[in-house]
Amino acid sequence: MRHEGPKASLDLTHVLYDDGSYFSMALALVTLSPILLMASYAALAVQTREFLIIVMWAGQLFGELLNWVMKRTIKQERPIESIGNGYGFPSSHSQYMAYFASFLMCHLYFRHRFSSTGSKLIDFLWRLVVYAALIGWAGLVAYSRYYLGYHNAYQILWGLAIGTTLGVSLYLISEAIPTRYPTSPLGRMKAAILNNPIVLWLQLRDGWAVWADGGREGEWLRWRKQFEAQQKSQNWEAKQKSLKQKAN
C-alpha cells in the first residue's frame, strides 16, 4: 500500500554545490568519500576477522551515535539553514574523518610495521606519505563542509577535536594499554574477549599481537609458495602432454 504522508529527504548522498565551478564539484565528491569507509570496514571485518578492524568499526559507529545525540541536544543551526537537514554542531563529517585518521595513525605508529625497502630513509619517507595522506583526506573532507556551506569553522573544529579525541582514546584503551601492559585490567579484558567461546567460533584474531605486520607477509609467502608449486605442476603436465602428442 502506497503511503501518501509527508516526505523526508535521506541526506546521505545529497550534496549542493556550485554548478559553474569544477573546484566546487570536486569538493562535493570529496565530501561524499567517507561513505566508502563503512563498506571497507564491513569487507575487511569479514575477510580478515581482525579484532582491531572490528573495534575500529565499532568506534566509528559509536562516534556517529554520539554526534547524533550531541546535535539533537545542542541544536545549533547550520550557517545556511536551507542547506542540508538537521543541526550543524558538531560537524559529523569532520568528526568521522578525524576519528578514522587518528585511530589508524596511532595503529600505524605504535604497532604496524611496513615492509622495508632496504633504505631507512625511503621507509621513513613512505610512512610520512601515508600519514600525510590520512591527514590530507580528513582535512579536505572538513574543508569541503566549510566551503560548501554546510558548517562554519567553529562546528568543523569541534568535529575534528571530538573525532580525534575519540580515536586516540579508543586506541589507547583497546590496543596500546593492553599490549604494553597485558596483565592490567584492560589487558586481561582483551585476553578474555579473544578467548571467549563465541569469538573462537567466529575465528576472530589479533594478528598484530603475533606479527609486526598483522601477518600480511606470512600469508603472502604461503600463497607464493603454493602458487609456484601449482605453476610447476601445470608446466610439468603441459610438457608431458606435449611429449605424448609428439610421440603420436
Image (cartoon, rainbow, N blue to C red):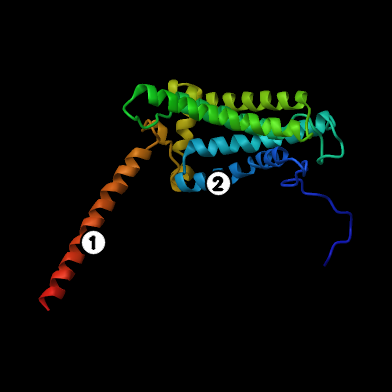
Closer to the camera in the image, 71 or 160? 160
Type of amino acid at the residue the image marks with label 2: Ala
Task: Report the residue marked by disc 1.
Answer: 234
Closer to the camera in the image, 197 or 52? 52
Residue 64 in the image, given as x and y percentages of width and height: 68, 36
At x 72% / y 46%, what residue is drawn?
12
Left or right: where 28 falls relative to 152: left
Q: Vertical placement of 101 versus 199: above or below?
A: above
Residue 246 in the image, given as x and y percentages of width and height: 13, 74
**Residue 143: assigned label:** none
Closer to the camera in the image, 33 or 159? 33
| Mark 2 or mark 1: whose residue is earlier in sequence | 2
Task: Report the residue marked by disc 2.
Answer: 42
Quadrant, the N terminus: bottom right
Taking the image as drawn, is residue 238 in sight?
yes
At x 67% / y 26%, what residue is drawn?
160
